[in-house]
Image (tube, rainbow, N blue to C red):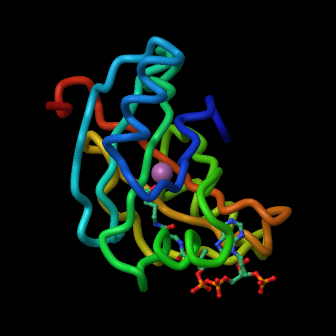
């Protein structure tokens, strides 16, 4: 079902500061910067490698407000690893199969993610305490 790790999401208070740190320290290229109002984040994707069905990245996340998922996470736990995202070939099928196994889906349908992807989240309490994201990457022709 999972093809690769698409990204790990890191919650931070100052996006520009963390982009500078991660890109310089690990020599990674920033391949996208976006504001996603629906998710309540300002974010950047730092490219690590290309794999089956898409790349793998570090996603840096700064909250747009204190009552957004990342804003609440920062208040409770501080900066750090927020979620792990796995690449899937067909997100609707993955959601159905995973939901049937009793894992709570936080999204009823796929949402818009970084770089034209489709995403959906699984409840951390049902996945070993790890907020888990499913990602169906955009087809190369669809990406900007
Ligand atoms: N990782 C692990 N556990 C987490 C968590 C995280 N990121 N966020 C919350 N939790 C835990 C909390 O610690 C809490 O556990 P306890 O009851 O034991 O204290 C429990 O889950 C409930 O957390 P909460 O603080 O009450 O927060 P909410 O229930 O309001 O929201 C969640 C938690 C996961 C449902 C919400 O953050 C969510 O819907 N997330 C999905 C969307 C998202 O995160 N978007 C931003 C990223 C966008 C992107 O990647 O593109
Ligand atoms: Co993510």
Residue closer to the observer: 138 or 129: 129
| Percent of width and height locating residue 67 | 42, 85
Q: Is residue 141 above or below residue 88?
A: above
Q: How many marks?
A: 0
Question: Residue drawn 45% across and 23% down?
Answer: 55
Question: Residue drawn 29% across and 30% down?
Answer: 139
Is residue 91 left or right of 95 when viewed as pictured?
Answer: left
Q: Is residue 127 above or below residue 93?
A: below
**For ligand 1, which image quadrant applies?**
bottom right
Q: Is residue 59 above or below residue 113?
A: above
Question: Residue drawn 49% across and 68% down?
Answer: 70
Is residue 39 left or right of 22 when viewed as pictured?
Answer: left
Is residue 90 left or right of 117 when viewed as pictured?
Answer: right
Is residue 115 left or right of 91 when viewed as pictured?
Answer: left
| Percent of width and height locating residue 9 | 54, 48
Residue closer to the observer: 45 or 119: 45
Residue closer to the observer: 23 or 41: 23
Q: Is residue 125 above or below residue 98?
A: below
Question: Residue drawn 59% across and 54% down?
Answer: 94
């Amino acid at each position: 079902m999972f093809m690769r790790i698409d990204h790990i999401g890191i919650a931070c208070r100052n996006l520009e500061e963390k982009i500078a740190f991660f890109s310089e320290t690990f020599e990674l290229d920033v391949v996208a910067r976006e504001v996603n109002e629906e998710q309540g984040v300002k974010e950047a994707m730092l490219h690590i490698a290309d794999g089956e069905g898409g790349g793998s990245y570090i996603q840096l996340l700064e909250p747009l407000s204190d009552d957004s998922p990342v804003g609440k996470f920062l208040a409770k736990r501080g900066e750090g690893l927020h979620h792990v995202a796995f690449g899937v070939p067909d997100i609707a099928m993955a959601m159905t199969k995973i939901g049937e196994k009793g894992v709570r889906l936080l999204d009823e349908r796929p949402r818009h993610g970084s770089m034209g992807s489709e995403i959906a989240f699984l409840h951390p309490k049902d996945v070993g305490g790890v907020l888990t994201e499913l990602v169906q990457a955009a087809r190369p022709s669809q990406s900007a």
